[in-house]
Image (tube, rainbow, N blue to C red):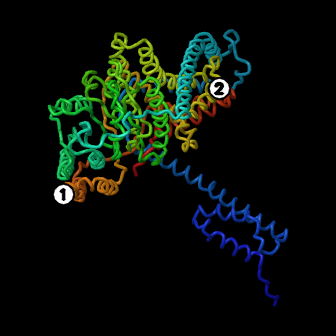
């Protein structure tokens, strides 16, 4: 019988030491978060109280640390095939069962489908030519021996003499527009850096409203909404708890809902706040024309509006802080030419999924850079339609709300600017709101946001030329505000990267330099992501997704410019009500309790509203089932780009190949609706 094996004291000592380190306060985490702690602890030298460590023991210690880290890496790599398999199975299931999204503009889709057919035919022709070695010794018309060789020789002649020159000219124009737009973005970023370095920000001449209720101006607060079942409670509550004298403010809930259940719920919510002593009214239009502009116009026609000096507007998913009015209204004091105070949006669901993260990058640049720079240097920017305070006199002198476009906010801002009014943007005052989490909702929102400005530009171009503002303001409105940022940006993005680049693979006589395809877009993506530095890991998805969205923005821009039917379509962006109703009620009770108790009023419970909401949810129409969809334009463009990437392999264009490949995959992911909210 062999002698018993002596215990391994070295391993036991190491195990006890590592267990003690892991359970000590600096390393009290568990799960995956504890692994780096173990690894870090293993690298630390032993304490002076311990016995000297033998070199052989050190080597074994180091080997264990290396094996631990290799295990983590292997676990990560082993999960990738499962992730890809799950993605592939979801894509197959989506193709077999998901419905096609209704196409608002079939013209562009038919053109893209024709382009796809030509790309496939040309790829087959190029593969046949490559298999016969014609890429190395191109045949001529005179030396062609058979029909295919004759066809290829004729194709080479046509593409070199008739197709490539106009394509190259168009590419040069788009490159020039791309560079001009890039310079504009860089100038805006330099302006933003200058503002932050100098600490420039609007300062109210009166840091706060005066004590005594007679010094508080009369403020009207409007909440336009339409079938906002998910968010009506939190928005009404956030507006009603404003830290402002009750007799100096009036809340208008402007309900355009056509769902009777939602109307009843909103009426009950308004009644609840009336019982709390809040001056709040419910308005519902019988004739719902003009969308949001018509709703606001109808509300401003009330006789009692003449008693109010300012109006604050909040969409149904916006939740202003209780001090919102106290941080915005003072800016009007002493600024008789100030029409608008706009505040920044903050998003409660920016980390919900990849789609919301990418939206946050775009909107962070819009507010941090565009709105702030334009507000500081030229006192003009586009009104964001919500989370802003207007001087009612400025609204009336500018013509009020008009129903002629789907961007009534930009319309009134342009007309007020032409009348000589000034705007202020407050980057440090934030209003919580919600980002669309599904691609369907985001696409409809972007279509409205990019078709409306072209409608407005077509309608107000002559008004800009006839206005009495100086030539600088006219040039800024026409060339920067409308043409460069609303027309040229979607035009070159779609044309250059989705049309011209794939065509250059089939017409190699026309070329796009690598710096246009890779380096400049990368630099501009880095510039765009600077206001949201935590989103830096998403810089590559952001670049690819922005090119993918260019087809929607281009289609919307063309629709608005040429008055196609879909340009006047208004669809309310779907909200999910991400803010907790319970949190908001407790928040409202905490802030509103002192004022309500002083008047001897008791807080009404929100539980009855929740019970009523749950009851009505059970009786919703069965036909409204949320489903992921397939998007035909995006899928067709995905196959075009993947076909062009296959063609680029024949000419060994490395950067072009990788760009086309990953851009095609991005179009495919978006076309299968695999980005954003996934409905099981």
Q: Nearer the viewer, mark 1 or mark 2?
A: 1
Q: Could you tell whether 192 is left or right of 43 in the image?
A: left
Asked whether 136 or 626 is in front, the reply is: 626
Considering only vertical position in the picture, is 355 above or below 550? below
Q: Disc 1 designates what residue?
A: 600
Viewer-closest of 485 and 620: 485
The residue at the point 37 percent across, 36 percent down is 101
Q: Residue at x 33, y 24 (%)?
A: 337
Task: Report crowding for label 2: few under 14, some 14 to 19, many 20 or more residues within 10 A (C-alpha).
Answer: few
Q: Is residue 127 left or right of residue 480?
A: right
The quarter of the image holding the N terminus is bottom right
- x%, y% of residue 7? 77, 82
**View extreme (bottom): residue:** 1
Residue 302 position by quadrant:
top left
Q: Which residue is tagged 2?
A: 515
Residue plotted at (23% across, 57% down): 597
Q: CA distance from mark 1 to mark 2?
A: 70 Å
């Amino acid at each position: 019988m062999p002698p018993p094996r002596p215990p391994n004291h070295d391993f036991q000592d190491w195990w006890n030491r590592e267990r003690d380190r892991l359970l000590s306060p600096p390393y009290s985490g568990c799960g995956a978060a504890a692994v780096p702690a173990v690894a870090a602890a293993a690298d630390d030298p032993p304490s002076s109280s311990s016995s000297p460590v033998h070199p052989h023991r050190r080597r074994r210690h180091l080997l264990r640390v290396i094996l631990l880290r290799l295990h983590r890496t292997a676990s990560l790599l082993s999960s990738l095939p499962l992730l890809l398999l799950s993605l592939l199975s979801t894509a197959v299931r989506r193709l077999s069962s998901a419905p096609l999204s209704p196409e608002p503009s079939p013209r562009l889709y038919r053109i893209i489908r024709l382009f796809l057919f030509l790309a496939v035919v040309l790829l087959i022709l190029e593969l046949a030519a490559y298999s016969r070695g014609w890429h190395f010794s191109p045949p001529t018309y005179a030396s062609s021996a058979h029909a295919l060789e004759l066809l290829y020789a004729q194709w080479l002649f046509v593409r070199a003499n008739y197709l490539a020159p106009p394509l190259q000219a168009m590419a040069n124009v788009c490159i020039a527009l791309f560079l001009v737009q890039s310079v504009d973005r860089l100038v805006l970023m330099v302006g933003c850096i200058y503002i932050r370095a100098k600490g420039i920000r609007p300062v109210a001449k009166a840091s706060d409203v005066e004590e005594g209720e007679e010094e508080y101006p009369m403020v009207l607060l409007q909440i336009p909404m339409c079938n906002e079942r998910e968010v009506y409670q939190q928005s009404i509550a956030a507006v009603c708890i404003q830290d402002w004298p009750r007799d100096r403010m009036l809340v208008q809930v402007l309900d355009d809902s056509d769902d009777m259940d939602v109307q009843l719920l909103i009426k009950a919510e308004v009644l609840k706040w009336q019982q709390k002593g809040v001056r709040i009214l419910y308005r519902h239009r019988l004739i719902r024309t003009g969308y949001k502009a018509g709703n606001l116009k109808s509300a401003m026609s009330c006789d009692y509006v003449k008693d109010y000096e300012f109006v604050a507007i909040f969409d149904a998913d916006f939740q202003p802080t209780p001090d919102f009015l106290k941080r915005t209204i003072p800016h009007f004091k002493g600024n008789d030419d100030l029409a608008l105070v706009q505040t920044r949006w903050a998003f409660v669901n920016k980390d919900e999924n990849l789609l919301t993260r990418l939206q946050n990058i775009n909107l962070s640049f819009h507010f941090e850079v565009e709105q702030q720079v334009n507000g500081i240097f030229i006192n003009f920017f586009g009104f964001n339609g919500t989370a802003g305070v207007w001087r009612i006199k400025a609204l009336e002198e500018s013509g009020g709300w008009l129903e002629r476009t789907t961007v009534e906010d930009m319309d009134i801002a342009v007309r007020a600017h032409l009348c000589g009014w000034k705007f202020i943007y407050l980057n440090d005052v934030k209003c919580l709101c919600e980002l669309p989490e599904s691609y369907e909702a985001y696409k409809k929102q972007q279509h409205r946001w990019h078709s409306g400005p072209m409608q407005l530009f077509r309608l107000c171009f002559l008004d800009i030329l006839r206005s009495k503002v100086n030539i600088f303001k006219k040039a800024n409105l026409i060339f920067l505000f409308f043409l460069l940022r609303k027309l040229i940006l979607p035009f070159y993005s779609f044309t250059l990267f989705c049309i011209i680049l794939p065509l250059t693979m089939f017409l190699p006589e026309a070329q796009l330099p690598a710096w246009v395809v890779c380096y400049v877009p990368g630099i501009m993506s880095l510039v765009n992501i600077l206001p949201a530095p935590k989103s830096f890991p998403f810089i590559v998805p952001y670049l690819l997704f922005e090119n993918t969205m260019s087809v929607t923005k281009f289609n919307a821009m063309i629709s608005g410019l040429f008055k196609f039917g879909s340009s006047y379509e208004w669809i309310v962006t779907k909200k999910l009500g991400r803010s907790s109703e319970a949190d908001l009620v407790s928040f409202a009770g905490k802030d509103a309790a002192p004022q309500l108790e002083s008047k001897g009023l008791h807080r009404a419970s929100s539980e009855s509203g929740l019970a009523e909401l749950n009851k009505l949810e059970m009786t919703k129409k069965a036909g409204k089932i949320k489903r992921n969809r397939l998007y035909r334009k995006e899928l067709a463009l995905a196959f075009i780009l993947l076909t062009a990437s296959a063609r680029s392999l024949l000419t060994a264009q490395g950067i072009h190949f990788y760009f086309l490949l990953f851009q095609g995959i991005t179009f495919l992911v978006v076309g299968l609706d695999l980005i954003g909210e996934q409905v099981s």
